[in-house]
Image (tube, grey):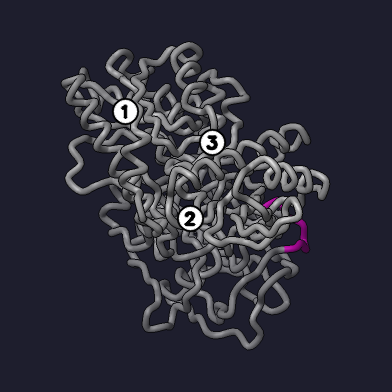
Amino acid sequence: MNKVLILDLGSQYTQLIARKVREFGVYSEIIPYTTPVTEIKKEKPAAIILSGGPRSVYDKDALLLSKEIFQMEVPVLGICYGLQLMAHLLGGRVSPSKKREYGFASLEVKDSSTLLAGLSRSGQVWMSHGDKVEEIPPGFVISGETANCKTAVIENRKDKCFGVQFHPEVIHSKEGLKVISNFLFKVSALKADWSMGSFIERKVQEISSLVGDKKVICGLSGGVDSLVASMIIHNAVKNNLVCIFVDNGLLRKGQYQQLMEKFRKKFALNVIGVNAAGLFLQKLNKVTSPEQKRKIIGSEFIHIFEKEAEKLGGVEFLAQGTIYPDVIESNPVKGPSSSIKSHHNVGGLPEGLKFKLVEPLRELFKDEVRALGLELGVDKDFIFQHPFPGPGLAVRIVGEVTGERLRIIRDADDIILQEIRAAGIYQDLWQAFAVLLPVRSVGVMGDKRTYQRVVAIRLVQSIDGMTANWFPADSEVLSRISSRIVNEVDGVNRVVYDVTSKPPGTIEWE
């Protein structure tokens, strides 16, 4: 299978590059720019892409690469900072631009024989740079320019090194996908051999080889990720997989009972149910830090899995539904970007873990996991349910988690889901939920003064959870939700609506 490695140099669009490459049927993977060339060679990439980034190549803290990258006889595409870095390392000259270029620009095609094949002679692209290449390296030619950047596209066809100053991966570059396609298929001569079917086949073989005749336990959360992971593993190890579904007291109303029945009857999985609601609430007593909440919950899950594994005997592997955004947000391992938050199944794992991990979805984005689930025969209603965080309602209560606050958030959450389904907008949304705020509000109910809780409504749209837009909900829908929460959820007298996108916010409040 072809593999394109994307070296992350700090761009906000790095994940988008990976997604666009995969959409062309070519497998891509993001690695840190600091990865040694020896390790990169072991990966045997069919092509390499250098992402953009916020630095300047002449800064003291510039993010630099080894020149060996360009001597691997592997096609390389540099995007924005990636282009500048390529030019800088190969003998060109980069300097600050007299006129910075942010936003739309018109790309004039000078040579459409290779990277720009099939593009219009003049077309819209998206620029975001303060530096530019003043002198191109030896062996390069200029194939595209803008009014402010005469080196907008440079090519060394002999050594298969190409660079674009604009961002072809964003929707604002009208024909940007043609550039990516040309690099993948015209320049690199790759095959579109990445599909869900091929992924399943490869993962089943990998897991079967790794696990052998040992036992695997898989923690089911009630969401799509862990279910799909368990189904792939079941294909590989059959009866040696035991799934564990823990009622941690942080689930939605009626969720534990409903899902236990579905797991056992509809998906025919071997599932052990564990009631640990009291234990989790005790461990979370007086904890207000969201990071600490996640780590405590992750740690307690592991302790429960360890106890169940001891009962079963012969368990060496723990399977999880970890997906790519979990890894990216939990650890700055994919480049120079900062850690956002710990996911309970990544940053919440304790040191000295007794199990070897099996994470078949670790390379996939959410929409890819859903496509994989459909390939495996999971019904659409389950596949397209809204994501629910592993730490559950604990991260939808800002501040301390108590039994009373869980009652409030659980009832409010249930009302929101009922109303958005009744309005026919459930499938238009990525997530819809309530957040209990750590403040009280003065109100008037029944001619009496009240001083009660505030609930925030969060409705967002997204493709993969990496970015999200707040949903412009109809005022009548919001009014019904608000009225029902205030009237039906004891202890709440005010409801507000969150109109923050990601970035700058995250989807969950904690």
Q: Amino acid at mark 1?
A: Glu
Magenta segment's dominant SS is loop
Tell me what residue is drawn at x 72 percent, y 52 percent.
445
Tell me what residue is drawn at x 38 percent, y 27 percent.
245
Neighbor class of circle 1 (other Cα within 10 Å; few <14, some 14-19, many 20+) is some
Q: Nearer the viewer, residue 331 or 79?
A: 331
Q: In the rendering, at what x and y percent does residue 183 appear?
A: 56, 51
Q: Which residue is mark 3?
A: 368
Count the numbered circles shown. Answer: 3
Q: Nearer the viewer, residue 504 or 178?
A: 504
Magenta residues, as a range?
Answer: 115-124
The secondary element bearing badge 1 is classed as: helix
Q: Per the image, is 155 magenta?
A: no
Tell me what residue is drawn at x 36 percent, y 22 percent.
273
Q: In the rendering, at what x and y percent does residue 35 appear?
A: 31, 58
Q: Which residue is mark 2?
A: 510
Q: Which residue is mark 1?
A: 206
Q: Which quarter of the figure has residue 235?
A: top left
Which numbered mark, 3 or 1, is in the foreground of this view? 3
The secondary element bearing badge 3 is classed as: helix
* Image side of residue 202 versus residue 416, left or right: left
- Mark 3 and mark 1 lie on one chain; the one further toward the N terminus is 1
Neighbor class of circle 3 (other Cα within 10 Å; few <14, some 14-19, many 20+) is some
User: Does 20 sit above or below residue 451?
Assistant: above
Q: Which quarter of the figure has residue 399?
A: bottom left
